[in-house]
Image (cartoon, helix red, strand yellow):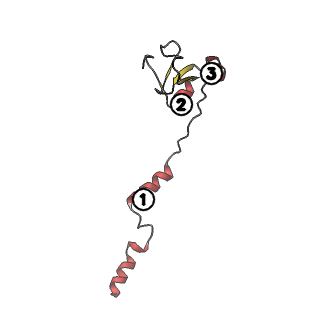
Amino acid sequence: MHFRLAANSIGRRDRPVASLGVGAWATILLICHAQQAVALPLTPFRYETQAQQHCPGDTVVWLDFRRGRFYLKGQSRYARGFDGSFVCSSEARESGYRRSLLGLR
């Protein structure tokens, strides 16, 4: 009996840090080193001239919210649809929207 108590006190059970499992340590490590995802502001405009005034040095594109793509002027879906808006191309790219290559998708 005396030896059993001595063996238990020498082992890992007396250290609370060692009692955490590998999964708990991995979770703590990920939380400490995770970068916060910050949503970039996207300023949608109803009219093309409003968007051009907002970003005079940038190209104005038509952003289709439902498809998650933006269209350049001259493409077939530019300024079409009810679920889109005019935005600056740099804001659209930074917000995660993709450019439609053919303007048909």
The tag earlier along the polypeptide, 3 or 1, is 1
- Distance in Å between CA atoms under marks 3 and 1: 48 Å
Q: Nearer the viewer, residue 17 or 48?
A: 48
In the rendered image, residue 82, in percent from the top left (x then y), is placed at: 53, 22
The residue under label 3 is 51
Q: Residue 85 carries which label?
A: none
Residue at left offset 47%, top offset 13%: 76
Name the side, left or right, on which 44 lies relative to 7. right
Residue at left offset 54%, top offset 27%: 92
Residue type at numbered disc 3:
Ala
Which residue occupies the extreme top position in the image?
74
In the rendered image, residue 35, in percent from the top left (x then y), is placed at: 51, 45
Q: Nearer the viewer, residue 34 or 68?
A: 68
Do tag 2 and tag 3 residues touch (Cβ < 8 Å)? no
Q: How crowded is mark 2: few (under 14 residues within 10 Å), some or many (20 or more)?
A: few
Q: How crowded is mark 3: few (under 14 residues within 10 Å), some or many (20 or more)?
A: many
Q: Is mark 3 on a helix, strand or loop?
A: helix
Name the side, left or right, on which 51 lies relative to 24. right
- Distance in Å between CA atoms under marks 2 and 3: 16 Å
The residue under label 2 is 94
Residue at left offset 48%, top offset 16%: 77
Residue type at numbered disc 1:
Ala
The tag earlier along the polypeptide, 2 or 3, is 3
The residue under label 1 is 24
In the image, is residue 38 above or below residue 14? above
Name the side, left or right, on which 9 lies relative to 61. left
Q: What element carries label 2?
A: helix
- Distance in Å between CA atoms under marks 1 and 2: 34 Å
